[in-house]
Amino acid sequence: LFRSMKATIRVAESAMSRIDRLGADAAEAIHLAQPDQVGWRLAAIWIESIDHAAGMLLGFGSKIEVLAPEPLRLELSKRAAQVCALYS
C-alpha cells in the first residue's frame, strides 16, 4: 500500500467487525485505539489518496467519521450527496 498521508478517523464499535476491509495497517491502528465511553475509537491511519480513501470509507456510512484531512471530509460529503440525490 502506498502511503501518502494520514487521516484521523473515529470508528463506531458496530464497524469493528468489518474494519479489516481497510487493510492490515489501518485495522491494527484502529484495534489498538482505546474505545471511549460509548465505544468510538479515535485513530490515525495512512491513506493512499483522497479518492481511494473516500471509496473505502464511504461503505461504512455513519459508522466512521473522518476528522482530517479536510479534503477527505469534503470528498466524502460530495459523494454522500450524490448517493442521496440518486435515491431521492
Image (tube, grey):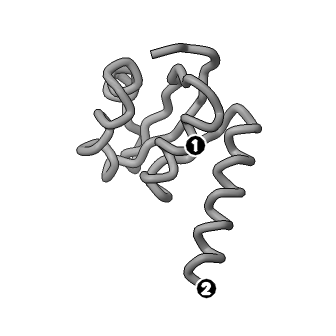
Give x and y (percent) for residue 64: 48, 47
Helix, strand or loop under label 2: loop
Image quadrant for the N terminus? top left
The residue located at (47%, 42%) in the rendering is 56
Nearer to the camera, 36 or 40: 40
Q: Amino acid at mark 1?
A: Ala
Earlier in the chain: of badge 1 and badge 2, it is 1
Q: At which x and y percent is residue 32?
A: 34, 22
Looking at the image, residue 21 sits to the left or right of residue 69; the answer is: left
Q: Nearer the viewer, residue 37 or 53?
A: 53
Q: In screen coordinates, is 86 left or right of 12?
A: right
Give the structural element (helix, strand or loop) at label 1. Answer: helix
Q: Amino acid at mark 2?
A: Ser
- Kindly identify which residue carries mark 1: 54
Residue at 61% across, 85% down = 88
- 28 or 80, nearer to the observer: 80
Q: Is residue 87 left or right of residue 69?
A: left
- Total labels drawn: 2
Cα gap from disc 1 to disc 2, whole angstroms: 22 Å
The residue at the point 62 percent across, 62 percent down is 80
Instruction: Relative to 59, say whether 29 is above or below.
Output: above
Q: Which residue is mark 2?
A: 88
Outermost residue to the left: 17
- Could you say which quadrant of the image residue 72 lies in? top right
Characterize the local packing of mark 1: few (<14), some (14-19) or many (20 or more) Cα atoms within 10 angstroms: many
